[in-house]
């Protein structure tokens, strides 16, 4: 079976104020249809830049030169431009952000945002059909009175409810790939578990594959079949979760594992920074 995402030798040079920085350095990875892959690494490792490079979404004010190959759900992403690129993203990718307020428009009711997402992805059924689908989708993510709640603005919902709308919006069009970009970092552990459970449930329902970006190796291990570990733009280790946890080969992965706080173990040490050069 073809992988839903296949990345070959992806390299990104970001230029800001005339200074070049290789933020993604020769990355290769493959995610099978229905599978789950976590990208872990400390802050600045290049996780966000990798996702941006895969999706072709560049931060404002930064020029990014991306080379290599990205096949996503049959789309040759690096060759797409303009409307074709936006359509491919809308059809094939759903994204859950750390802060759902970033992805929701504060000036539109949440129900309208869901129907607009359906419309943009080319979903049929007319206006009425799309509204009914949006209401159903809200019910699927646990809203009890979606007729009423769909008329609320994002700021009128709680943080947990907004994240549920975020997950609903990301899975509504049944994309082949669901990306969680630190989706639970800002949440307490109880809500964190609920959000991750809901993402798993929606994946089961739609058959989507999961690419989970996290600095939390514990979350990665619990939710994903495979893990890649990034450091300074490169993948330093990749493999099945069980293998990596029981027999990590790279010193950096071992340090990440040792830095997970445990109730029964010694207090973890701070990881050395790349500049300290203790690991390579
Ligand atoms: N807008 C930008 N312009 C230029 N370089 C950037 C920009 N954003 C990040 N970088 C650089 O890209 C590299 C990778 O950063 P990135 O944000 O991808 O790391 P990350 O692993 O996602 O970290 P975090 O977990 O903190 O989000 C870093 O060296 C960073 O300084």
Image (tube, rainbow, N blue to C red):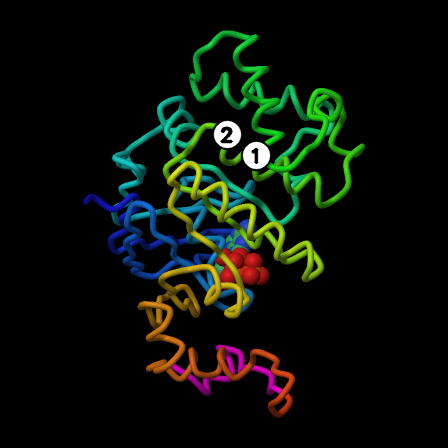
In the image, farthest residue toward the bottom:
266
> Any magenta on residue 279?
yes
Labels 2 & 1 near each other (Cβ < 8 A): yes
Q: 56 left or right of 276?
A: left
- Of residue 232 and residue 240, the one placed in the foreground of this image is 240
The location of residue 262, given as percent across then percent down, is 61, 82
Element under disc 2:
loop
**The magenta stretch spans which residues?**
268-280
- Of residue 125 and residue 21, the one placed in the foreground of this image is 125
Count of numbered marks: 2
Residue 131 position (above or below residue 36): above
Distance (Cα) linking label 2 and label 1: 6 Å
Task: Give the residue number, with chain letter if any, for mark 1.
Answer: 168
In the image, farthest residue toward the front:
144
Give the number of the disc on residue 172.
Answer: 2
The location of residue 233, given as percent across then percent down, is 41, 64
Element under disc 1:
helix
- Residue at image x 39%, y 58%? 24
- Residue at image x 49%, y 35%? 171
Q: Quadrant of the N terminus?
A: top left
């Amino acid at each position: 079976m073809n992988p839903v995402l296949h990345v070959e030798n992806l390299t990104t040079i970001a230029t800001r104020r005339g200074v070049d920085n290789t933020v993604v350095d020769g990355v290769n990875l493959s995610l099978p249809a229905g599978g789950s892959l976590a990208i872990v690494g400390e802050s600045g490792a290049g996780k966000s830049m990798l996702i941006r490079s895969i999706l072709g979404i560049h931060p404002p004010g930064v020029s990014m030169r991306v080379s290599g190959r990205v096949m996503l759900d049959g789309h040759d992403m690096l060759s797409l431009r303009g409307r074709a690129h936006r359509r491919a993203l809308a059809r094939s990718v759903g994204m859950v952000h750390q802060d759902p307020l970033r992805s929701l428009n504060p000036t539109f009711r949440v129900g309208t945002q869901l129907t607009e997402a359906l419309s943009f992805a080319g979903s049929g059924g007319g206006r009425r059909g799309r509204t009914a689908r949006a209401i159903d989708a809200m019910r699927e993510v646990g809203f009890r009175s979606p007729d009423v709640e769909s008329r609320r603005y994002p700021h009128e919902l709680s943080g947990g409810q907004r994240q549920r709308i975020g997950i609903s919006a990301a899975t509504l069009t049944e994309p082949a790939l669901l990306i969680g970009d630190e989706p639970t970092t800002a949440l307490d552990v109880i809500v964190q578990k609920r959000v991750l459970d809901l993402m798993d449930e929606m994946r089961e329902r739609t058959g989507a594959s999961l690419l989970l970006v996290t600095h939390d190796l514990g979350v990665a291990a619990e939710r994903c079949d495979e893990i890649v570990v990034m450091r300074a733009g490169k993948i330093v280790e990749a493999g099945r979760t069980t293998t990596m946890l029981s027999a990590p080969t790279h010193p950096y992965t071992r340090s990440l594992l040792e830095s997970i706080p445990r109730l029964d173990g010694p207090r973890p040490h701070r990881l050395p920074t790349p500049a300290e050069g203790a690991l390579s």
